[in-house]
Image: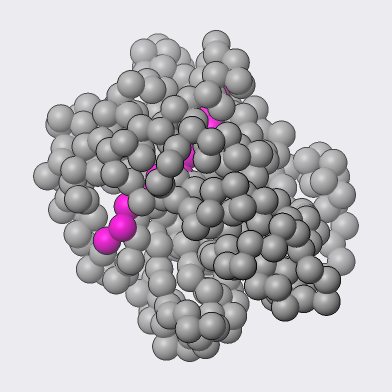
Amino acid sequence: MRLSLLDRSRTRAGASDAAALEATVARAVHAERVGYDRFWVAEHHAVPGIASGTPAVLLAAIGARTDRIRIGSGGVMLPLHQPLVVAEQFLVLDALHPGRVDLGLGRSHGFTPPVRRALRRDHEDGDGFEDDLVELRGYLEGTAEVTARPATGSPVPMHLLATGHGLEVAARLGLPVVVGGPILGSDELAGALARYRRSFVPHAGSAPRVTISLDALVADDDATARELALPEAWAMAVSRQTGEFPPLESVAAIRDATWSGQVRRRVEASLDRAVAGSPATVRRRLEAMAERTGADELLASTSTHDRDALLASDRMLREVVG
């Protein structure tokens, strides 16, 4: 099973957004050094806890600091962009870093109503997502009515961030999928993946391919790893109360905070879902996930407040999966 990282450029309390971006680039360099297959970045607009909403720009910086690791978006939210513009951005990346670029695509319209209004997505014009995917692929493959530049000669691979309906779209278009979020905990997951593989229509020789995206942190023991998972779980629980996704707090600050019963329940539920533990614990849980899903690739998407501990976790996870 291949192993990749998704970094959301999470901000930390008391630190600048620029520091979060610098940490993302440094983490990519470290991921290449310890042997990861891909490094993905995300697109989130106007979120206080996330520094980057522009995957193509951030990937250009990462590509310039790395040599071998594949770099990609997890993902570009296609409803917010014109397909030609997305194609041009990623063809430029591919020309600068040939054979290393992947284009992951999602369909989110924005985090909150004000953000959707700022992105001009407050009024829906119908669902043209599948048509936009086909149009985008035409530009990347050089088969569209106009030729996107630069023409690199080899299409940038597309991946679809998928849930239930997204799996059906990916199967029809012959695209690999990245599966994460609530669907991972559902009883329908195995059946949904089986239907994806069964109904898959190959495109240009493609075959069904599943990447599982989940929170994964490794430490010397289970209790320490669970502490590392706490800042992200806390941020998610707080966001459910306030409507605003906050920067990561330190474990000490979180322990000193006042916890409502509802926040405590949500934090504990998040920690239980995370794959966080000693190398033996994480190996056991990932083997069970691989057996359940037949995954071709694991995309580890966790962050934590302590950047040194995060890099150590990345190295230990590479050893577990390697």
Q: Is residue 216 above or below residue 244?
A: below
Where on the picture, by quarter, is residue 198? bottom left
Q: Quadrant of the N terminus?
A: bottom left
Task: Give how far across and how far down residue 101 sits, in percent.
Answer: 53, 54
Residue visible at 24% across and 44% down in the picture: 318
Nearest the viewer among 6 and 155 is 155
Nearest the viewer among 214 and 77 is 77
Task: Give how far across and how far down residue 119 sits, in percent.
Answer: 82, 46
Left or right placement of residue 107 versus residue 198 in this view:
right
Task: Give how far across and how far down residue 305 sits, in percent.
Answer: 41, 23
Where on the picture, by quarter, is residue 81? bottom right
Nearest the viewer among 130 and 96 is 96
Chosen colour scheme: one colour
Residue visible at 58% across and 67% down in the picture: 154
Q: Is residue 8 magenta?
A: yes
Residue visible at 47% across and 80% down in the picture: 206
The magenta stretch is 1-11
Work out whether residue 181 can be spotted. Answer: no
Q: Is residue 174 above or below residue 274?
A: below
Left or right placement of residue 143 versus residue 273 in this view:
right
Q: Is residue 144 magenta?
A: no
Task: Give how far across and how far down residue 224 sits, in percent.
Answer: 22, 27
For the image, the number of numbered tags is: 0
Left or right placement of residue 92 versus residue 279 in this view:
right
Q: Is residue 2 above or below residue 301?
A: below
Q: Is residue 199 above or below residue 119?
A: below
Work out whether residue 157 can be spotted. Answer: yes
